[in-house]
Amino acid sequence: MLAKVGSETIPLVFFDPQYRTILDKQKYGNEGKNRGKKRSSLPQMSVQVISSFLAEIDRVLIPSGHLMLWVDKFIIGTGINGLLEGRNFKVVDLITWDKQRMGMGYRTRRYSEHLVIAQKPPIRAKGVWRVHDIPDVWSEKVENGVRDHTHAKPILLQKRLIEAVTNVGDIVVDPAAGGYSVMKAALETGRHFLGCDLLG
């Protein structure tokens, strides 16, 4: 899908890869059982696949455009810069999403996910980021209709971010759309949406 999008035409891309790294490192031996069943049934993305997505996102973003990249604490701990290496993005902020429900974890159990905010040069905030009341810790329970997807994301947060860096009528892209929460957020804010997912 991204290959069909023109270069430097998109102001905002959300990307939520299905990381393989944490599952490889943990080696729980219980993938596909009980609570892990939905998660492990999703197609996993290797570092190479994620890198190819990031290369295309780099190409389609306008100058000073934003990438909203969902990561877990394993990616944060092992270094986000390695994932973005060789791309034109610079990390400019980070939001922690308090999901208000307990998730997986070998030692501590996860209540949060993280959204890395990266920007394509030239790096600017003034005149580009227009909403200034978004906290860096965001609490939001996922709505019932969206929770059917194992990686559902917070629609209200995504709406605020869309309003922060795009204009009404702009196109918001999500190349790994999952439960299509970005689509809902984009349409509710008067933006257009372009996205797809392997599972529908």
Image (spheres, rainbow, N blue to C red):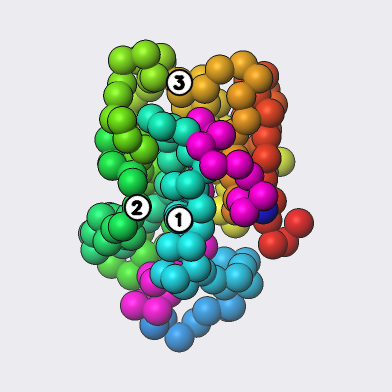
Q: Sort mark 2 into few (<14), some (14-19) or many (20+) by Cα contacts within 10 Å.
A: some
Q: Which residues are magenta?
A: 2-26
Residue type (three-letter) at the residue carrying disc 3: Ala
Q: Nearer the viewer, mark 2 or mark 3?
A: 2
Q: At numbered mark 2, what does the secondary structure look like: helix, strand or loop?
A: loop
Residue underneath mark 3 = 164
Q: At numbered mark 1, what does the secondary structure look like: helix, strand or loop?
A: helix
Q: Residue at x 48, y 47 (%)?
A: 59
Quarter of the image where one finds residue 129 = top left
Residue underneath mark 2 = 87
Answer whether residue 185 is magenta in the image: no
Residue type (three-letter) at the residue carrying disc 2: Arg
Q: Residue at x 51, y 58 (%)?
A: 53
Q: Is residue 182 visible?
A: yes
Distance in Å between CA atoms under marks 1 and 2: 7 Å
- The x, y position of residue 115, in whole percent, is 39, 42
Q: Sort mark 3 into few (<14), some (14-19) or many (20+) by Cα contacts within 10 Å.
A: some
Q: Nearer the viewer, mark 1 or mark 3?
A: 1
Q: Residue at x 62, y 16 (%)?
A: 168
Q: Is residue 102 above or below residue 162?
A: below
Name the mark on residue 55: 1
Q: At numbered mark 3, what does the secondary structure look like: helix, strand or loop?
A: helix
In the image shown, does 142 or 43 lie closer to the viewer?
43
Name the mark on residue 174: none
In the image shown, does 190 or 106 lie closer to the viewer?
190
- The x, y position of residue 136, in whole percent, is 31, 30
Which of pointers 1 and 3 lies earlier in the amino acid sequence?
1
Tag 1 and tag 3, C-beta contact below 8 Å: no
Tag 1 and tag 2, C-beta contact below 8 Å: yes
